[in-house]
Image (cartoon, rainbow, N blue to C red):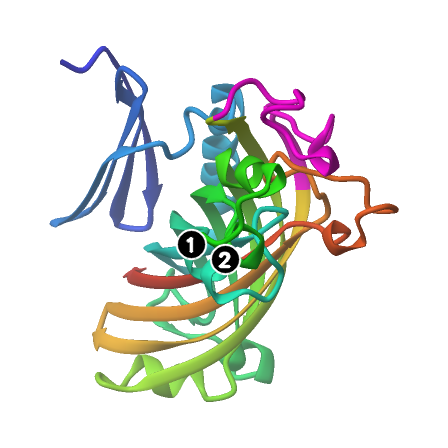
Amino acid sequence: MLRKFEESYIKCGVLKLLLLFFVYKSTNFYFILELNDVFIYLSLIELISMQMPKKYIAIVILLFAFTNNALSQFGFSHEVGVILGPVAFQSDYGERNDFSTNTGNTGYGIGLIHYLNFSYRADCNCYTPETYFNDHFKLRSELSYNKTDLQHFGRWVDPDKTSLFANQLRGMRGSTSVTNIGMQLEYFPLSIRDFSSTIGAWAPFISLGGQFSFYDPEAYSTLGPLNTPISTPIKYYNATTNQGGTVWSIVGSVGTRYKLTELSDLMVDLRLQYYFSNWVDGLNPDPAVYVENRANDWNVWLNFGYIYYLQ
């Protein structure tokens, strides 16, 4: 049974964007997105409630509503969508530049996105004055979540390695959950107007932006408590944490849209997100001693998305 229910309504033009937040069963988070007769239902996903304090979610909703209402006065049109896909987390777990590490430390990501479309005016159902910026740029805001289970892969944990160090590495486990809020400016080399009017067209793009992230790591060992001679390699002594925190990151992506219908697109993009911290995965060996672990954490996310135009 659902134990708690709270809903927030946000009006975008003549359509209704209904966000049902804080609907959960036990620790599971439920989310429903309604766009007129189009329903997207995402359940059993640890999407925001376990990561970001609820007061921050309420602030995000209020800011979204205020920004949407304010910018509508300038005649911009809006687009909303959902993205999801696999995330390869690059961290202190595993061997650098190792294929098994890259494929093994892979999780999932999911998010909500919103675009300001400068080429079209929702208030008059007409195009804006033609400028290069209006016809080639969109501003994307995002609320997303990703989670990855982590462990050591590579030559140091090969089956033929039987040392205590190798056994300790094999016993180490971890995970990280990250909730992101941010914006990106997307550049479309081809005309946005031409793409909008042509079903079946493609619109490649590149983007760059920043995000503020809430991370929640977990580090443990199957051999026993960490920071003991039995369970923990010396390089990871006092270099683990299960304490969450916040961090800024820079995000860049390359992708394309496909015009599915007059009011909807499909999207795919490949994103790289670089965090300005080495604690996002819960591990941080002394970078002055263990130079192979000096890089901050980052991830690669392959997104598949559906975008709906609000008019």
The C terminus is located in which quarter? bottom left
Residue placed at 42% from the left, 54% from the top? 104
Q: Can residue 75 be seen from the camera position used here?
A: no
Marking on residue 101: 2
- Mark 2 is surrounded, within 10 Å at the Cα level, by few (under 14), some (14 to 19) or many (20 or more) other residues, namely many
Dividing the picture into quadrants, the one containing residue 169 is: top right
Q: Looking at the picture, which amino acid does disc 1 mark? A: Gly
The front one of 143 and 1 is 1
Magenta range is 223-247
The front one of 141 and 157 is 157
Residue 235's place in the image compared with 21, above or below, is: below
Question: Whole-percent x and y of residue 99?
Answer: 48, 66
Residue 286's place in the image compared with 306, above or below, is: above
Determine contact: label 2, label 1, CB under 8 Å: yes
- Whole-number angstrom distance, CA of label 2 to CA of label 1: 5 Å
Question: Whole-percent x and y of residue 199?
Answer: 22, 83
